[in-house]
Amino acid sequence: MVDLTERQQNWFAKVREGILRDTGKTIEEWAEIARTCPETAHRKRLTWFKERFGIGQNQASQILDAAFPPEPAPDLWQDPAAKHLFELVKARILTLPGVVVGERKSFTGFYREFQFAAMRPMKQGLLLGLLVTPDHDPRLLPAGKEGWSERLKSKLQIQAEADIDHRLDPLIKASWEAS
C-alpha cells in the first residue's frame, strides 16, 4: 500500500472497524466470501457486494483489497528525461514538512492533510497539478480532468529544467499551505 497521511490512515481504520460492527463478520471472513465472487472486475465486484449483501462501496473496497491485494503501481517515471524533471520538482516539494508521497496508477500524488500536488509524465516532460488556482501565475492552466484529485485547480507543463525556476516554489508552498 502507498504511504498515507495520518488523516487517511484514520479514515481507513474507521471503515475497517465499521465492517465488524455493521456486519458481524471480520474483514478476513468477508475476504473469504469475496474470493467466491464470480466477477473479476473491481466495479462489478463492488456491485455484487452491494446487491448481494447490502455492503456499501467503502467497506466493500476494503474487503476486496484484503481478498485481492492491489498490485504495485507501475513505474511511471521510466523515461529518463521525465524522471529527471520529476526528481527536481519532487526535491522542491519535499523541502516542506509533513509531505507524504503516494504512487498511483497514473500519477504521483503529494499530500499533507489532503492532496496538494500531483505529477504525471507526458511525452515531453511532465504535468504538475497544484491546489492553487490558475490566477496565481500566468503559466498555470485550469486543471481539467487529469485523473487526480478534483481539489487540484491548476496544472503546469514542465518540459525542461528552465521551467523549474524560482517562480515555482511559491506555487508549491501556497498549495501545501492550503492543504
Image (cartoon, helix red, strand yellow):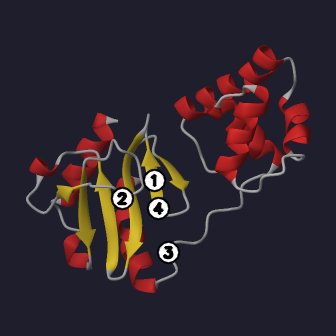
Mark 1 or mark 3, which is nearer the start of the sequence? 3
Q: Earlier in the sequence, mark 4 or mark 3?
A: 3
- Return the residue nearer the eye: 56 or 115: 56
Up-down relation of residue 101 to residue 64 (above or below): below
**Residue 77: which numbered mark, if any?**
3
Contact between marks 4 and 3 (CB within 8 A): the answer is: no
From the image, tell me which residue sits under label 2: 146
**Distance in Å between CA atoms under marks 2 and 1:** 12 Å
In the drawing, what numbered circle is on residue 109? 1
Residue 1 in view in this figure: no
How many angstroms separate mark 2 from mark 4 (CA)?
9 Å
User: Distance of mark 4 from mark 3, alpha carbons?
Assistant: 9 Å
Q: CA distance from mark 1 to mark 4?
A: 6 Å
**Label pair 2/4, CB-CB below 8 angstroms:** yes
Residue 174, can we see it?
Answer: yes
Instruction: Please rate how many residues cluster around mark 1, counting C-alpha atoms within 10 Å: few if below 14, some from 14 to 19, many from 20.
Output: many
Q: Please, what secondary structure does the residue beneath circle 4 have?
A: loop
Above/below status of 87 relative to 115: below
- Point out the tag, 3 or 2, that comes first from the N-terminus: 3
Q: Secondary structure at mark 1?
A: strand
Residue 119 location (% of width, % of height):
39, 62
Q: Would you name the residue on which mark 4 appears?
A: 107
